[in-house]
Image (spheres, coloured by chain):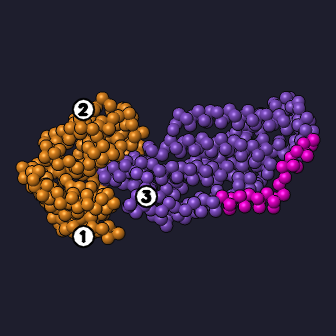
């Protein structure tokens, strides 16, 4: 029973590729560590400095809470409006990018290229550019978040749409639906839950992003972070960190609960 | 009436899906197409409403060429042809009623359907269609809560609501158990007899084909190898047609089998 089978057995595939991949990854890691002069030792030798700042941060200035309510609400409003605008603009882009909706490759590939281009620009850079164009305030922040949101929502949704059941699409073709009816009855009911879920997720990300946009002058709580850090007012910084933490945790919690219900 | 005139289909990789098919299907017939996997059953059926394109020849429906139709006129052809699929192809997240109403979209303007404003008559039509397949009590249930057999009956109701003159069913019972198979086939037969809707069904099993069909068409390697009433479709006849083919498949082993 234990002899080699008589019929031709294919040769086991070589493992060389896996080993090579491992070596390349390790080499990249070592090179990055060496060139960036990253040093875990530094983290420990500078611990005194860290301790000083942390000690200075306590106790937080609780009286400062009342003053930051307005900028905090401004941050939330920026995130709400930016996410909403982004979601609306994302819809046509999604339909152009998904290759099971738009079967014309010379439209879907350029659309994806533009989308990837949008996604390569960090939101802080976008905000800085819009501040230069529109001046200080919420408006550049909202525009930056809008474009940032389009990138996330469109990318995640079109990729989900490419994975949906194609049965209903075939059925809608067979009943003689035109393209708009076809999308309304086979794509939208299947994609809506994903879309809403990604919009909520983007809102979570935007709250965090909006909190730092003030660093470049684009409104919200970030302006206060910037000025307090500048004045070495660590108790106020601590209050800001706490307030931001609370808002982010609450919004993440609500958004997560809603998304669980959706999918 | 459906007419195939010298219809052939060649896939881009050179495989012949259909070879010079000539068929005439009369109004009100209940036709079952049988054949082994990869014989071209699905290609033949789907070429009727052009879910698959043919490479040569022409298909006429009531003496008008669907092969030449484009845009709106193709959609009007399709509106009159109901289709039932192996995997039901319902939107699982939508209600049963909405799935049935989706069969009506080609009758109305885009704007009206996009906002879901179907007229009262359409809703009644949909409910009646559901009643005909005994599932009207599930009208407001989400489709993913139904069993496979129930979902297939909903898809039959969709074809009925469409007021189709022809129903095409591509392996409608392949993913169902024997009992629900009987219910679904009974529904199709009833609709065929009561409403006179021409019905063309693809099936794997010759015994079910004999039970329901008025005429059986046998396909093998893209060619019509049998076409006649049920009485002529005897076991001996099919042994003769497919026996050799089956033996050949077995000799070749599983590697060459099941080429689509």
Identify the residue under disc 3.
A4
Q: Is residue A104 left or right of residue A70?
A: left
> Across the whole image, how many numbered discs are drawn on residues?
3
Q: The orange chain is which one?
A: B
Badge nearest the viewer, 1 or 3:
3
Q: Position of residue A184 (x, y in %)?
A: 42, 48
Identify the residue under disc 2.
B134
Q: Do the residues labelled 1 and 3 touch (CB within 8 Å)?
A: no
> Which residue does the image show at 10% across and 55% down from the upper left?
B237
Q: Residues within 10 Å of mark 2 (few under 14, many from 20)?
A: some
Q: What stretch is highlighted in magenta?
A: A22-49
Identify the residue under disc 1.
B56
Q: Which chain carries label 3?
A: A
Badge nearest the viewer, 2 or 3:
3
Q: In this view, does B223 lie above or below A205?
A: below
> Which residue does the image show at 48% across and 46% down from the upper left?
A191
Q: Quadrant of the C terminus of chain B?
A: bottom left
Secondary-structure class at tag 2: loop
What secondary structure is the magenta-colored segment mainly?
helix
Q: Position of residue A86 (x, y in %)?
A: 61, 49
């Amino acid at each position: 029973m234990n002899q080699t089978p008589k019929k031709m057995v294919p040769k086991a595939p070589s493992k060389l590729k896996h080993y090579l991949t491992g070596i390349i990854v390790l080499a990249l890691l070592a090179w990055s560590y060496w060139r960036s002069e990253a040093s875990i030792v530094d983290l420990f030798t500078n611990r005194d400095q860290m301790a000083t700042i942390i000690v200075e941060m306590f106790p937080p200035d609780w009286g400062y809470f009342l003053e930051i309510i307005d900028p905090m609400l401004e941050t939330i409003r920026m995130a709400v409006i930016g996410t909403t605008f982004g979601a609306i603009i994302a819809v046509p882009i999604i339909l152009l990018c998904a290759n099971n909706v738009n079967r014309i490759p010379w439209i879907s590939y350029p659309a994806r290229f533009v989308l990837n281009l949008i996604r390569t620009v960090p939101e802080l850079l976008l905000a800085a550019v819009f501040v230069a164009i529109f001046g200080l305030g919420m408006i550049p922040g909202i525009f930056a978040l809008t474009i940032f949101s389009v990138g996330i929502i469109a990318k995640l949704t079109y990729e989900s749409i490419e994975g949906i059941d194609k049965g209903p699409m075939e059925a809608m073709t067979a009943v003689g639906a035109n393209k708009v009816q076809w999308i309304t009855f086979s794509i939208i009911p299947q994609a809506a839950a994903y879309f809403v879920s990604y919009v909520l997720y983007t809102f979570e990300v935007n709250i965090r992003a909006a909190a730092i946009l003030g660093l470049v002058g684009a409104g919200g709580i970030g302006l206060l972070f910037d000025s307090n850090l500048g004045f070495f007012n660590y108790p106020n910084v601590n209050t800001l960190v706490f307030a931001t933490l609370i808002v982010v945790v609450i919004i993440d919690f609500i958004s997560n609960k809603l998304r669980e219900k959706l999918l | 009436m459906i007419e195939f005139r010298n219809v052939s289909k060649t896939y881009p990789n050179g495989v012949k899906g259909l070879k010079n098919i000539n068929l005439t299907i009369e109004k009100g017939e209940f036709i079952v197409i049988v054949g082994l996997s990869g014989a071209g059953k699905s290609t033949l059926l789907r070429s009727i409403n052009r879910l698959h394109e043919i490479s040569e020849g022409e298909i006429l429906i009531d003496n008008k060429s669907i092969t030449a139709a484009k845009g709106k006129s193709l959609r009007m052809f399709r509106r009159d042809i109901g289709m039932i699929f192996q995997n039901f192809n319902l939107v699982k997240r939508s209600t049963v009623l909405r799935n049935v109403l989706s069969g009506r979209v080609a009758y109305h303007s885009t704007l009206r359907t996009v906002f879901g404003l179907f007229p009262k008559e359409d809703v009644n039509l949909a409910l009646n269609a559901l009643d005909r397949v005994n599932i009207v009590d599930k009208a407001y249930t989400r489709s993913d809560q139904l069993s496979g057999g129930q979902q297939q009956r909903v898809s039959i109701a969709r074809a009925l609501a469409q007021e189709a003159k022809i129903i095409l069913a591509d392996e409608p019972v392949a993913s169902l158990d024997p009992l629900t198979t009987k219910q679904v086939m009974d529904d199709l037969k009833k609709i065929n007899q009561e409403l006179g809707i021409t019905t063309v069904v693809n099936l794997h099993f010759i015994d079910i084909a004999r039970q329901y069909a008025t005429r059986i068409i046998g396909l093998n390697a893209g060619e019509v190898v049998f076409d006649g009433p049920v009485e002529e479709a005897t076991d001996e006849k099919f042994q003769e047609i497919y026996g050799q083919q089956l033996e050949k498949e077995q000799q070749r082993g599983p590697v060459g089998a099941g080429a689509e």
